[in-house]
Amino acid sequence: MEHKFFPLFIDLSHKRCLVIGAGNIACRKIKTLLKYGANVEVITREVAESEILELQDIKISMRDFTEEDLKNVFLVVAATNNSDFNRYIYEICNENNILVNNMTSKVEMNARFAAVYEGDSVQVAVSAKGYPKKSLEIRDSIKKLLEKN
């Protein structure tokens, strides 16, 4: 079933965000969350992207995820390379009204990250319904257009 996503800008300052997994995609999502002031915790068995270890202001827990980890969490990023496990995380979060972004599905999530352009007086977010490369292309076109003026 396809979800209808309502576009919304959210202040993540001091919001508890959980990233499950620690690969390349997780690293990009962690950086984005940190940029917007989130309190980020990473739960993983192993860190596949060493850059994560260099990031400031995150908590890394080297262990398996448990449902108890979702207590008082605002947003979850399911960023493991196991689509069945990410679906499981999505289902738990969705049942508990927790925002969740699933890196291995375009539909088993209730929150998407957008490609963002921030100018002096404007912020534009683009979603191409789960196709990040297309989102980036559109964002870059918008950036060129806005920076001309």
Image (cartoon, grey):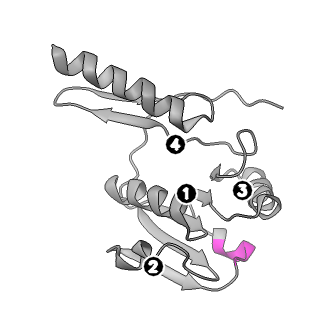
Give the magenta part as a residue range.
65-69
Amino acid type, mark 4: Phe
- Spatial CA distance of label 3 from label 2 is 20 Å
Q: Position of residue 145 (x, y in %)?
A: 26, 16
Q: Position of residue 96 (x, y in %)?
A: 73, 55
Q: Nearer the viewer, residue 61 or 6?
A: 61
**Residue 8 visible at all:** no
Looking at the rendered structure, the secondary structure element under dot 2 is strand
Chain-order first, disc 3 or disc 4 = 3
3 vs 4, front mark: 4
Amino acid type, mark 2: Lys
- The crowding category of the residue bearing disc 1, from other C-alpha atoms within 10 Å (few below 14, some 14 to 19, many at least 20), is some
Chain-order first, disc 4 or disc 2 = 2
- The residue tagged 1 is 74
- The residue tagged 3 is 93
Residue contact between numbered discs 3 and 1, judged by CB atoms under 8 Å: no
Q: Is residue 73 magenta?
A: no
- The residue tagged 2 is 59
Identity of the residue drawn at 56% across and 65% down? 19
- Spatial CA distance of label 3 from label 1 is 10 Å
User: Could you say which quadrant of the image residue 106 lies in?
Assistant: top right
Q: Left or right: 108 with respect to 117?
A: right
Identity of the residue drawn at 55% across and 57% down? 74
Looking at the rendered structure, the secondary structure element under dot 4 is loop
Q: Main secondary structure of the magenta part?
A: helix
Q: Position of residue 134 (x, y in %)?
A: 52, 29
Q: Left or right: 121 with respect to 88?
A: left
Identity of the residue drawn at 60% across and 42% down? 111
